[in-house]
């Protein structure tokens, strides 16, 4: 795991966006995707909003995906395996980069054909405690014609990232 942790950190230091092609193993990515599909079939995903639990807005002109919050209380073996890896990464990041991360939150985001999330800052307007964002992709056999690339807007260098299975993106939230 440390190799993938170092890949994210080195890429972040070089480009201000950490990328690791296989942060999630194919097995974990496949199991998470199966779990996501099961949740969708059980109608457990909800409309994604913007904001936080205190102030949340739903505007399908801004964001049209569906989400499901991951939680250890679910006691799902695949979510738990994901949390084990994330917690190891956070511990590694805190030890090697002195980031001071003490908490986290993750959710599935399901984008159907035509869904989108407009350009935004990954920071709440009323709470600046979020310092980093991380995205892991579960798209097996993704092709450019499928769309869904992530566009990260940077001052001098926008980055277009293909959402391929197992790839993880790590970035500092600008405030």
Image (cartoon, rainbow, N blue to C red):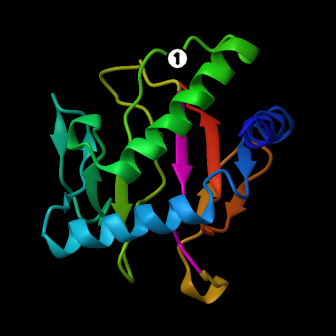
Quadrant location, the N terminus: top right
Query: Image check: 53 left or right of 79?
Result: left
Question: In the image, which residues are magenta?
Answer: 132-140
Q: Is residue 146 in sight in this rendering? A: yes
How many numbered marks appear? Answer: 1
Which residue matches tag 1?
A: 101
In the orientation shown, which residue stands out farthest toward the front?
Answer: 77
Q: Residue at x 55, y 31 (%)?
A: 173
Nearer the observer, 30 or 69? 30
Q: Position of residue 63 (x, y in %)?
A: 32, 60
Name the residue at 34% across, 28% down: 125
In this rendering, the answer to whether 137 lies above or below 103 is below
Relative vertical location of residue 83 with respect to residue 35 in this rendering, above or below? above
In the image, residue 45 sits, relative to residue 15, either above or below, namely below
Which x, y percent locates residue 129? Answer: 41, 18
In-image side of 73 versus 96 (left or right): left
Secondary structure of the residue carrying numbered label 1:
loop
Which corner quadrant of the image does residue 96 belong to?
top right
Residue 34 painted magenta: no
């Amino acid at each position: 795991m440390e190799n993938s942790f170092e890949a994210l950190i080195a890429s972040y230091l070089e480009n201000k966006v950490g990328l690791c092609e296989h942060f999630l193993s194919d097995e974990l990515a496949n199991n998470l995707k199966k779990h996501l599909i099961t949740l969708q079939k059980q109608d457990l995903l909800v409309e994604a909003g913007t904001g936080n639990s205190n102030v949340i807005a739903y505007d399908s002109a801004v964001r049209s995906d569906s989400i499901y919050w991951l939680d250890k209380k679910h006691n799902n073996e695949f979510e738990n395996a994901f949390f084990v890896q994330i917690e190891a990464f956070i511990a590694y990041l805190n030890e090697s980069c002195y980031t001071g991360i003490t908490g986290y939150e993750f959710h599935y985001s399901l984008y159907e054909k035509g869904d989108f999330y407009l350009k935004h800052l990954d920071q709440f307007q009323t709470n600046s405690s979020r310092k980093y964002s991380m995205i892991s992709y579960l798209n097996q056999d993704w092709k450019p014609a499928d769309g869904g690339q992530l566009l990260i807007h940077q001052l001098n260098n926008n980055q277009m990232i293909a959402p391929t299975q197992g790839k993880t993106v790590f970035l500092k939230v600008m405030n």
